[in-house]
Amino acid sequence: MKISDNRGFNYVAGFHGVPQFKCWHHWRRRGEQRLLPLFLPWHRAYLYWLEQDLKDQVADITLPWWDWSSEISRDEGIPKAFSEKKDPSGNPNPLYKSHIFVPTATPPLDEDTFRNEQDTSLLPTKNDVDAVLRNTNFSDFEDDLEEIHDNIHGWVGGSMQRVAVAAFDPIFWAHHCMIDRIWRIWQTDRADLGFPVDLLDEVLEPFPFKVRDVLEVKSLGYDYASTSSEIIVSG
Ligand SMILES: [Cu+2]
């Protein structure tokens, strides 16, 4: 967050909404006429990009996922690592909020992210996730998963419910890791990884990757510690 050039958090957060608006949601991207189901691959490339920038600073760091369907989330809501205003030594917790600085936006942005979360009883359940996982067709799966994803953005509220600034809230990344993880679970035991073959060469701008490059998390050098949704609840 202290790095002000294109390796910094503020710059990378700006790929999603302001100022670059490169994200894909509900088959759409700003300035693109075609409708394409690139929500999942685009956000996987995005997570990978931030994680590589983080690794340049701290070699063994990885992005965590936030399992908002877990019992712990039902008790505590947003994980304490993200919700506490101060870290254990009394300094401001950088995961609680970030400062959005985009002077080129209309209007110019120079403000902190904020949240306005709802009651934990409204979070999706494991049954909701399991229902999404039962889809056999990629487009249906992605549509259903994106709907749960939208609900979490709305549940967190504040900056997270606006596409333009959502990625500036640090919880965005843990939320999207959970979405990425559910995709990874869905891909397990699918020889073709379930993606429409005619879209494998679509480029995931601004990243130098095609869809085919991000289909397999292991080829990107990562995997999820658990790809069974059972184990997470007890953790
Ligand atoms: Cu999102």
Image (cartoon, rainbow, N blue to C red):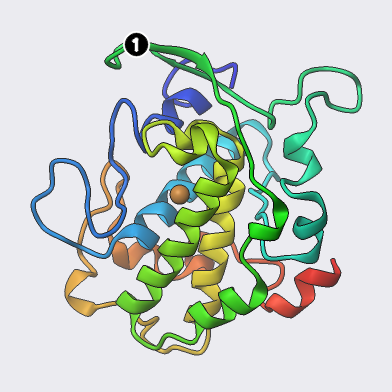
> Which residue is identified by label 1?
108
- Outermost right residue: 89
Q: Which residue is depicted at the point 30% across and 12% down?
A: 107
Q: Which residue is depicted at the point 67% across and 51% down?
A: 64
**Looking at the image, residue 60 lies above or below residue 72:** above
Residue 141, located in which quarter of the rendered image? bottom left
Residue 105 seen in the figure = yes
Percent across and percent down for residue 77 are 74, 49
Quarter the N terminus occupies: top right
SS at mark 1 in the image: loop
Q: Front-most of 99 and 63?
A: 99
Q: Which residue is depicted at the point 82% across and 56% down?
A: 75
Quarter the C terminus occupies: bottom right
Mark 1: amino acid: Pro
Is 165 positioned to the left or the right of 9 in the image? left
Q: Front-most of 140 and 205?
A: 140
Q: Front-most of 50 and 121?
A: 121
**Looking at the image, residue 67 lies above or below residue 234:** above
Tell me how many marks there are: 1
Percent across and percent down for residue 218 are 53, 68
Percent across and percent down for residue 220 are 49, 60
